[in-house]
Image (cartoon, rainbow, N blue to C red):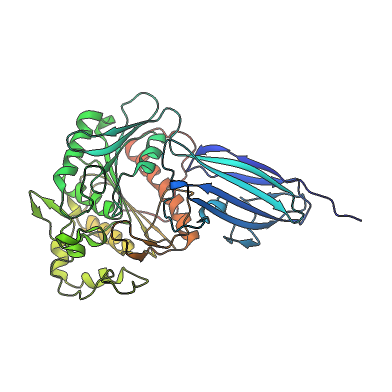
Amino acid sequence: MTNPVCAPVFSIDPVDGLIDEPRRIVVSGLVPDELVAISARTQRARDVVWMSQATFMADAQGVIDLTRDAPVGGDYAQVSAMGLIWSQQPVDSTSAELFPDDVMEPLRTTLTAETVDGVSAEADLFQRFATPGVERQEIREDGLVGTLFTPAGPGPHPVVVVLNGSGGGINEPRGALYASRGYQAFALGYFKAPGLSPFITETPLEYLETGLQWVRRKLAPRDGFVAVSGQSRGGELALLLGATFPDLVSAVIAFVPGAMVHGAQGAGDPARGGWQGTTWTRGGIPLPHLWQDNSAVHWHPWAGDVPPSRHHSVFFEGLKDTALAARARIPVENIAGPVLLISGRDDRAWPSSLYSRMVVSTLRRHDHPHLVRHLDFDDAGHAINLPFVPTTQLSREHPVSKVPYTSGGTPSGNAGADDGSWRGVLAFLDEMTGFAPQGAARPQPHAQADT
């Protein structure tokens, strides 16, 4: 008796949607208990192909459902509807670029299911950053370098200013997704962007102040609401802007932030102090930072030696100089609005979980009258990103210094933090603005703590 030949059939719901939408991926038409290998192939920036594969066993009805079934082998090992996406790795490349070259175009992923008999089927799914009607406009005004994303439909809209981290540049993917969810987003570059310094060293806060003033003057935000959202050094900067310009910042969203002003570190200009150079200035005067003649630190992770697996150790050392830490502390008690902090408990780049707790504690001691929310994720590291992108690059080369470093977390933990943090951001913004959500429902995230 010959075995029946299966003919796999894909069902994907939705086939085409925003990148933050999970998909239900089902393969049917299989023989019960059949082993089937499913692969996912995505072409990302600079034509680099990313791939993953996992093997599944069909159920008694000849069906595999990725929202229900864990793989029996492959690149990830638990039930995860989007596991084939976040477990991808670049093929023949060390690229860490997760997004397309043009955020107005979707990422296309080709899924292939192949049976042990060599019968295969293919299907595509599309992940978009910009919904139909979202407009993109490059801004080169008042010395500013950024990209404005405007939602479809009539305004005015609440506004989010989006800041990148120590990699510099303009964070267009997050800006486009904010706009797709109804928030006008100004992705503002402050270094390593056209016409700006290639280094973070001696960045004047007046430049960011000009950006905030431009937003209020030109965009007429709904109810005057302007949030600042930043990642890593951008998270440090978001807190600093909220504390320095409280009349211009309605809310702060700080991803894996620092509670201190730090030196230029891996994004510093070697000719102007390098790692220990000044990062921020105001009125031409450098802001005190944690590496400024720190009496407790006698090494740093980018000294040319083999990098440690936990770069955050040097930050714990730095905090032992308590007098300098007090001078370098961001005076977050001056922030005049709600604050959302997002961190990973296994952040090995710097201790974002500790820094976030320090911010929460300071605000609590000063009886901060606005909402303070801290989302702290287990098994997550420094690279908390948008939902449903690859999370496998735990060690990478810094885009400015070209020095290798470790971000921490696990691929699975980072994937959970990507999804949970973004839904937490949308919930926070919706709550603060009273804004009606667009698109799919926005569930509350895990690891939520309010004060």
Is residue 210 at all visible to an observer of this figure? yes
| For residue 370, above or below residue 259 | above
Indicate the quadrant where residue 116 lies. Answer: bottom right
Using residue 342 as the reference point, say whether residue 66 is left or right of it.
right
Question: Which residue, as the protein is rendered here, is positioned at the far top?
Answer: 154
Q: How many marks?
A: 0
**Residue visible at 59% across and 62% down?**
77
- Residue 18, horizontal then vertical, whole percent: 48, 39
- Split into 4 quadrants, where in the image is the N terminus? bottom right
- Residue 139, horizontal then vertical, whole percent: 26, 34
| For residue 291, above or below residue 384 | below
Q: Nearer the viewer, residue 324 or 123?
A: 123
**Residue visible at 47% across and 34% down?**
439
| For residue 288, above or below residue 247 | below
Using residue 390 as the reference point, say whether residue 297 is left or right of it.
left
Q: Nearer the viewer, residue 325 or 168?
A: 168
Q: Nearer the viewer, residue 267 or 46?
A: 46
Is residue 246 at all visible to an observer of this figure? no
Using residue 43 as the reference point, say whether residue 72 is left or right of it.
right
**Residue visible at 39% across and 25% down?**
153
Indicate the quadrant where residue 433 lies. Answer: top left
- Residue 368, horizontal then vertical, whole percent: 22, 50
Using residue 4 as the reference point, say whether residue 280 is left or right of it.
left
- Residue 112, horizontal then vertical, whole percent: 64, 48
